[in-house]
Image (spheres, grey):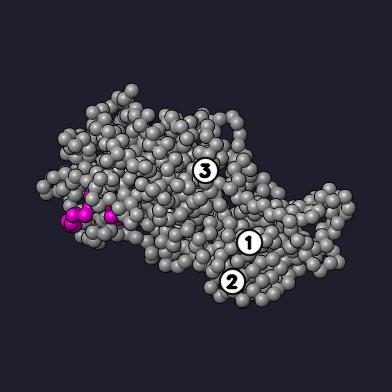
Amino acid sequence: MLLSLALLLFTIISCSSVEVNKEAKEITDFPDALEMEGVPDSTTDGGISVFTDQGSWFGFAFSAGRSPQGKVGFSGPYRISDSWRTASRWQGKTFAKLLLKKEGQDSYREPIEVSSHSYPGRLQQQVKYADITATMTLIFSSEKTVLVRTELKNRSSASQKIIPQWRHTSFSNFLGIEADQGILKVETGTDEPSYYISGDFPFSVHREEAAYDVAAVNPVELAPNASATTYLSYSYSKEEASAPIADAGDHFSENRSRWNKQINDMLGAPTPWNKDRSLQRLSIKSIMTLINNWRSPRGDLRYNGLFPSYAYQGFHGIWSWDSWKHASALALFDSELAKDQMRVMFDYQNESGMVPDVIYADSTENNWRDTKPPLAAWAVWNIYEQSGDSTFLSEIYPKLKRYHRWWYANRDHDGNGLCEYGSTDGTRIAAAWESGMDNAVRFDDAVMVKNSENAWSLNQESVDLNAYLYADKIYLSKMADKLGLSRESAKLYEEAQGLKERINEQMYDSKSGYYYDKELESEALIRVKGPEGWIPLWAGIADEQQAVSVRDIMMDEDHFRSTVPLPTLQVSHPKFNPRNGYWRGPVWLDQFYFGIKALTNYGFDKEASILVDQLLKNAKGLAGSPQPIRENYHPITGEGLNARHFSWSAAHILMMSQMESLELEH
């Protein structure tokens, strides 16, 4: 049944709270949702997936080799760059590679079998010897420190005295080793930061060219069938090096509790998605993708925030459009991190209300040439619905309102209440960037028009931008109502109704049954079909007949029902180019999600479910695989394209997982 128009006004996209499933999940239920194995060939080897947590700027992978001994230990540390100008670098090739020998013997024990698993929040490796099993577990106790727990179990009937040591191999022959009061300082090069090692046992250090071993001074005594546990900490803070050792067990318990809560917050929702084991694993992979891209405050970044992808050098900053999407998904399992994701961008809001396109740890690199589409109020409302935090609403509402008004003051060339994408420097490329759909075909013939000294527009009013602004008004109206600002709420609601009428009257074509951008002077519609045409359904702008017409186009094989459906350009368009097109054909999961919500908003649950099933079945490596989540997907072949470990793709997967109206066959 179609939603009534009155209901649509206040049911625009929301990730509402859901009843929690009582069946608890454990992090150990989901091994290897993401593959994290490999030894780097060089300091800039970018082909290996790494594990990070707690907003750290460094990470690790599992060692990989042909022999069992070659598989023991980890790879790293991998230092993540804070600039698009510099690449991330591997400081170490191997890390905490366990070597065992009996007291009084010189030769090391040979492992028989090595089993490595990446779990949510931890890397865990089990090494079996003839009569001993060693289990190594690596977690982050903070953004600066990791703990490595080594558990040795004697499987024999005889007592044993074992001397464990952990080998580290650097890419640099320059190794500065300095011990001071039980803390080891390791320098691997003049351009690399030092790190510090501490343990819960006395240890000695043995250096060998570009490698060094940390070895227990006293043997570990193992009674028959008994176990013993040791801890090592590795920190980029000397102050933190020894602190977590004293309560290392508590850190491991906290890690497990935190990740179990996050998992159960996501998988506890009684949705069709969560009934499928492989889709649960996809959700776990998505959570891990977001957390691996989480960066803690550094330099000029005063709050936590997420990179689009740590694996792509050009994405080592925090983007506004991405942030709104990341925050909406983070709100489902970590509302505090979601709030920071909003704060980190609005921390740079200027006096006129503009939020920059992207910010970096070095603020001189920030991009002020453009902003990004106004989805911030949508994200904040999603956070509020999950957290119920009215204090945060009070904090951010004035900033959202200024950002909203900025669009009309700087991007409405003719003052008719319909805005355009634009730039602050008059360049067309920055104006296209502002849309988020950088090289979309609909902008091919656009030119720039000047609004004021620092404000320029493309000479076309974009339907998606104005639909976002309609949704912005509705969400701001809701916030004002919650904050007791009844007059503001009513005014924003009234503005939204006027904008809705303008969009339907001027940007919808009844002959073709679709929404389009509109040229400024001629007022002619720019008849290119892309995802911008279903955004009015996402926002609740369309009437019932308009929604039916847009639905039919979305489900048509000559338009958007490709193998992986809902590409960013209709498949029959002559400029359709998924391989090299970026926004000229690939399927982006944000626009896919908006399309699915557009359909379910109007009761087209069956059609939405069909498209989601097609995505899950045909997008390679998405479900049922430990392959990284990609930036976008080829709509015909299903191949993953462009950046690996892409945050907003993961974010929209998680939002889809919470949709109760989907009826999935996957």
Determine whether the residue tagged by mark 3 lies in a helix, strand or loop. Answer: loop
Residue 121: x and y in percent read: 59, 48
User: What amino acid type should be assigned to the residue bearing mark 3?
Assistant: Gly
| Residue 527 seen in the figure | yes
Residue 252: x and y in percent read: 67, 48
Q: Which mark is residue 624?
A: 3
Residue 610: x and y in percent read: 39, 33
The numbered mark, 2 or 1, whose residue comes first in the sequence reads 1
The numbered mark, 1 or 3, whose residue comes first in the sequence reads 1
Verify CB contact (< 8 Å) between mark 1 and mark 3: no
User: Which residue is at a point 85% across and 59% down the rendered structure image?
Assistant: 161
Residue sitting farthest toward the top: 1
Q: Which mark is residue 65?
A: 1
Q: Residue 260 magenta-drawn?
A: no
User: What amino acid type should be assigned to the residue bearing mark 2?
Assistant: Phe
Q: Is residue 489 above or below residue 38?
A: above
**Of tags 2 and 3, which is closer to the observer?**
3
